[in-house]
Amino acid sequence: MSVLPAEVHTELVQLLDALQSAENSVRSTAEEHLANNWVATKPDMLLMGLVEQIHGSNDTTTRSFAAVIFRRISSKTRKAPNGDSVELFLSLPQEQAYVIRQKLIEALGAETTNSVRNKIGDAVAEIARQYSEGKEQWPEILGVLFTLSISQEVGQREIAYRIFSTTPGIIEKQHEDTVLSAFTKGFKDEDVSVRLSAMEAFASFFRSISKKAQQKYYALIPEVLNILPPIKESQESEELTRALVSLIDLAEIAPKMFKELFRNLVAFSISVIQDKDLSDQARQNALELMATFSDYAPAMCKKDPTYTSDMITQCLSLMTDIGADDDDAAEWNASDDMDPDESDLNHVAGEQCMDRLANKLGGQTILAPTFSWLPRMMSSDAWRDRHAALMAISAISEGCRDLMEGELTQVLELVVPALRDPHSRVRWAGCNALGQMSTDFAGTMQSKYHSVVVPAIIPVLNSPEPRVQAHAAAALVNFCEEAEKEILEPYLDDLLTHLFQLLQSEKRYVQEQALSTIATIADSAEAAFAKYYSTLMPLLFSVLQQENTRELRLLRAKAMECATLIALAVGKEKLGEDAKTLVELLGTIQQNITDADDPQAQYLMHCWGRMCRVLALDFLPCLPTVMPPLLELASAKADIQLLEDDEQVESVQQEDGWELVPLKGKVIGIKTSTLDDKHMAIELLVVYAQVLEGHFAPYVAEVMEKIALPGLAFFFHDPVRVVSAKCVPQLLNSYKKQFGIPSYEVSQLWGITIEKLLEVLSAEPAVDTLAEMYQCFYESVEVMGKGCLTPLHMDTFIDSAHSALEDYKDRVVKREDERADVNKDEGEEESEETLFAIEDDQTLLSDMNKAYHCIFKNHGVAFLPAWQRLHATYDAFLKSSDATQRQWGLCIMDDVLEFCGEQSWNYSQAIIEPLATGCRDPAPANRQAAAYGIGVAAHKGGPQWSHFFRPAVDLLFQATQMPNARGDDDVYATENACAAIAKILHYNASAVPNTQQVIVQWIDTLPIINDEEAAPYAYAYLAQLIDQQNPAVMSQGAKVFMFIVQALEAETLTGNTASRVIAATKMLLSNVGLNPAHLLSQMPPETQQIVRQYFS
């Protein structure tokens, strides 16, 4: 029975018809009428009318469309009487909401057309979501859905599970027996569509509950897996694809629950991948399922007897599924599309899976079974086998880097001959492999194998096929960007002769790639490129002076890039008058850019940045041209759209440069291409401020106020926040250079800056970005210097730090709980996600420590009252079983000792024991921090600390005698202990009994050849001993001389300290009658040459 009068329904039906009109004007007018006359003024009547249309209309289109509009309107946001924003349905009076819900449920039960029922189900799910997320009750919904799930009608059973799938929160807190029963029935339903909907609902529900709660449902997995074989037997690819998507979701959440049946699941999935009668999508989904297990449970995959070999075999097989109906590659060679969308093709799926297997399972597991195939495939008569083998090498080299690096000779023996293969696609794949290996084995490939790689690629630049030429040139980019100029120099003539020839190619993409490669070579070769300057630069100017046609835009952009990279390589002097010409050309191009999609615009920004680095202050006249468009880009607001229905989502998905974010039943579209440009523009502002320093001051206030500070809280795009954090200290430094400190201008700028910095330290949600904010803070304080923070600033800073530390502790506890819940198998590694989270936390706390250090350095004891509030946390860190936490605790105590002078003694009870224990810590970084702290106490702590130094000297000597004390990991701890003993002997010798014996022993802890901060203290004390003609040095002059030479050679001994030590050493050699020439003869020629500069 209708609640609303007939005339309301008449008007509503007319409105629904108009909203579906094919005419834009009619539809726009109807949308306006809907918003102004219904949604804004009588939303309760609108929803009631829509639900009565859903339930009562005889027209299926009207019922369906009314359900769509109902869902859209009910989720709109409106202001509640208390001023809060609330979703529209939840804002309705309870009585009306109840009636509308009942009518909606009745409509769902009564609907007989599947497509309409699904739309009504979406509307029900939307209301259920609002109640669930709003922590409000819809008591009837569960009973209705459970009743529908056992209905005689297939469509009703299916819609029940569809709604569960969309809003799993409504069943999360129900009695588990009821939930288990509902899912079990669904998994065994006689209709496959119901079984699949039940699978999807289960995956969605499973993701919504806690790890602990998930374990109660592990028993359902056999029922879930039993759904798959009958579908495969019936060759229903679409249904199999759906089922596999749900399994992939479950494998991501809790791969371990498949453990008992994993062997069977591997066998089933491999059989699907092999079955060429199934669709490619179904086969690829089976591959994706298996790859998901390698991502989330690598140990389980490694333990399975056939998983690795089966997966590699299937990947390689899929990778041969390429170039159908194009055996001679005529079609491929003729195509100018260098980046076709092949993401749904089998060979791409195989390559991507190989990459994941290598990265997750590692070389120990992957290499042997892969290379059992590759030599055979490389010698096959079928070009597709050879192509697949080469692409496999490209795919696995990153993940197998450690093991493959030792076998590169043999790998190159497989790859290099492919560059002479008769088939063009095999030569292309050979170039691809060499390019990828040049990146993955960067350094080794260039230093050890340049004589194999470069001469092999150069002839391929002469290939008859332009696509192969371009890919050979692209492989050279990978090789050259990691090569030292000394390695490239012998090849420059040959390389550039061939690349210049490619600039004459008829194919524009070949010319573009040749320019990119030449630019990379110039960047790596630096000054050595000057020889080719006069040949190439006129060519580039010629391209840049051509008419600006659409077809030439990218070529001109590449020419700009190449010209400015060459300018950077050869320098301002070599450029001469060409610098002016190049700047004028860039300015002309900028004035003629009118289209938003012109690629020259983005390239141009980077080109100006390079020219600034080349010209330095001579770039200043360009700023009026460069800055306006740059400031416009950097000031861009986020382009955000609320996408209210599937059509809008689909439309945006077809456009490049958008990111879709689900939010409360809707989808938010964020135009990331705009934000990427904003990020790039702020990056360039950082360059200008860095290079021009005080001369950039005219732009600083505007950039700080309108771009950098707002950018710190630009929550739509993490990279914008990060680059804004890089920008702030540079802008402060620019003002400081221009106006000095103290000055009114700097003071005003700092006033607004510090308030925003302290605000974002509390507001930043992402752990990795919060670390960047702390870095921005301490770099800014470092620029501003002594006394720049008030007590209130320091208190506010500690509020943020305390909150960040509490959040960190919560994350640590949560990780520990998850470890306990998961019951990790023996040999099971932490997930990659967990390892990244731990690394982010370590970076954050490290940057927080640097912030404390910077405040202590610039404010000394004034920071103690605020810092005192964190003392308990860091005291607990000092006692932690986690070595990194102990390090953080030791470093902050070192700061108290270094910057608080005699007041540090007030914390002696908290400091002495950790310093003593730290000297014996198994972690070298902690021994280093403890040794440094003892040295600082001796240097700056005051007389109260003197009684501590007697036992401390013994501990420091023990630290220098640890196993492998001079190894790469331990040497800094050893050298800091050496320097700390020197500080004690210099500043507190009276605290040490048997001083002479300690001095003799101390000399044997030298040399210091790594730590540039520790060396001056140790060697200054050594010079003091020589000046005093102490017997410990006079009796072993040769040894002392060698220790000094080692420090000079390592350049840890420099400046005034070096001069003083050298003078003392000359006196030592003279006094003890040592001939330095004789001592030098025992050293390598390079060392002799360095030392003679000092002792000539």
Image (tube, rainbow, N blue to C red):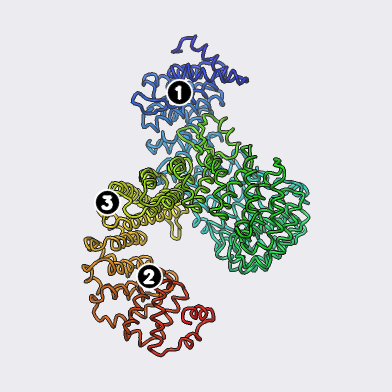
**Along the polypeptide, which appears first: circle 2 or circle 1?**
1
Q: Nearer the viewer, mark 1 or mark 3?
A: 3
CA gap between label 3 and label 2 equals 30 Å
Q: Quadrant of residue 824?
A: bottom left
Decide which of 182, 978 is in the foreground and name it: 978
Q: Is residue 1071 above or below residue 12?
A: below
Position of residue 549 measured from the top left corner of the image (x, y, whole percent) = 71, 41
Q: Nearer the viewer, mark 2 or mark 1?
A: 2
Residue 129 in percent (x, y) is at 43, 31
Disc 2/disc 1 C-alpha distance (Å): 77 Å
**SS state under label 2:** loop
Q: Residues within 10 Å of mark 1 (few under 14, many from 20)?
A: many
| Residue topped by disc 1 | 105
Image coords of residue 152 (percent x, y): 51, 27
Badge 1 amino acid = Ile
Marks 1 and 3 in Cβ contact (< 8 Å): no
849 with respect to 640 (left or right): left
Q: Residue 610, position in %: x, y? A: 58, 52
Q: Is residue 206 in sight in this rendering?
A: no
* Mark nearer the N terminus (1 vs 3): 1
Closer to the camera in the image, 869 or 1085 = 1085
Residue 884: give its label: none
Q: Secondary structure at mark 1?
A: helix
Residue matched to label 3: 866
Assess whether mark 1 and mark 2 are in contact (beta carbons under 8 angstroms): no
Give the secondary structure at mark 3. Answer: helix
State the residue at coordinates (27%, 51%): 866
Q: Which residue is mark 2?
A: 1014
**Foreground of the two, 6 or 763:** 763
- Bin the neighbour count of mark 2 within 10 Å (Cα to Cα): few under 14, some 14-19, many 20 and up: many
Mark positioned earlier in the residue sequence (3 or 2): 3
